[in-house]
Amino acid sequence: MVEGGLAVLALAGAWLFRIPLATMLPRGEALGQAIITGLGAVVPLLVLYAVLQKVSWRPIVRLRRQVLRLVRLLFADARVWQLALVSILAGVGEELAFRGVLQPLLIRWTGVVVGIGLTSLLFGLGHALSRTYLVLATLIGLFFGLLSYKTDEIASSIVAHALYDFVVLMWLLRRR
């Protein structure tokens, strides 16, 4: 509900601040290219996740335990389709809100570098289970922000975000 609510808030924010969200969602052949870009963009995120599973630095170890407990608490009985739905809603809701509305708005007010940086920080703050997670989520937000800025669309970041969430959720819940 939270993730879907973000999408609704994003649509309201786009209307309120006159942000042409529809132009950031490609159609036809451009949508196919955005999907392919999103599929490619998820690879470095999953590599980072895999590397962090091997790191023995105490803050990362604590974060892994914390995330595993939280995910199992929230999704212990979830079916695969439910995990897919949550992942899609997170990708759509968060990317519409952060990269579709907030980032263009902050870029309009502050410039490209500051706008992308502030959006990334706000994305990190929205995911801040700990200081470590704040830093990691901010970096991932920066990745999504640069991706959407460079491609001039948000479909690729939606695909990468949703697929990353789904793969990680599946991995965490299937690991016993």
Image (cartoon, helix red, strand yellow):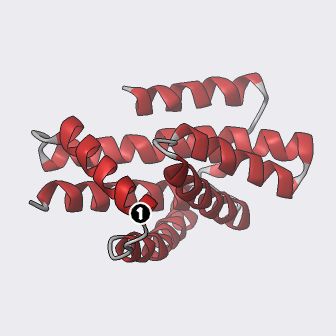
Check disc 1 and give the amino acid type: Arg
Q: Position of residue 72 (x, y in %)?
A: 19, 44
Q: Secondary structure at mark 1?
A: helix
Determine the residue positioned at 41% across, 77% down.
Answer: 47
Q: Is residue 148 left or right of residue 51?
A: right
Of the 4 image quadrants, the one containing the C terminus is bottom left
Rendered image quadrant of residue 154: bottom right
74 with respect to 42 (left or right): left
Residue plotted at (61% across, 64% down): 143
**Counting other residues with Cα less than 10 Å from the Cα at mark 1, is it few (<14), some (14-19), or many (20 or more)?**
few
Position in image of residue 67 (x %, y %): 32, 49
Q: Is residue 73 above or below residue 103?
A: above
Indicate whether 136 appears above or below 18. Answer: below
Q: Looking at the image, can residue 163 be seen?
A: no
Instruction: Name the residue that disc number 1 marks.
Output: 58
Please name the residue shown 39% across and 40% down the image.
Answer: 89
- Residue 42 x %, y %: 45, 69
Residue 175 appears at what percent x and percent y? 13, 62
- Quadrant showing the N terminus: top left
Of 101 and 136, which appears nearest the observer?
Answer: 136
> Residue 155 versus residue 113: which sits nearer the camera?
113
**What residue is rendered at 84% in x and 47% in y?**
107
Asked if residue 152 lies left or right of residue 163, the reply is right
Q: Is residue 75 above or below residue 151?
A: above
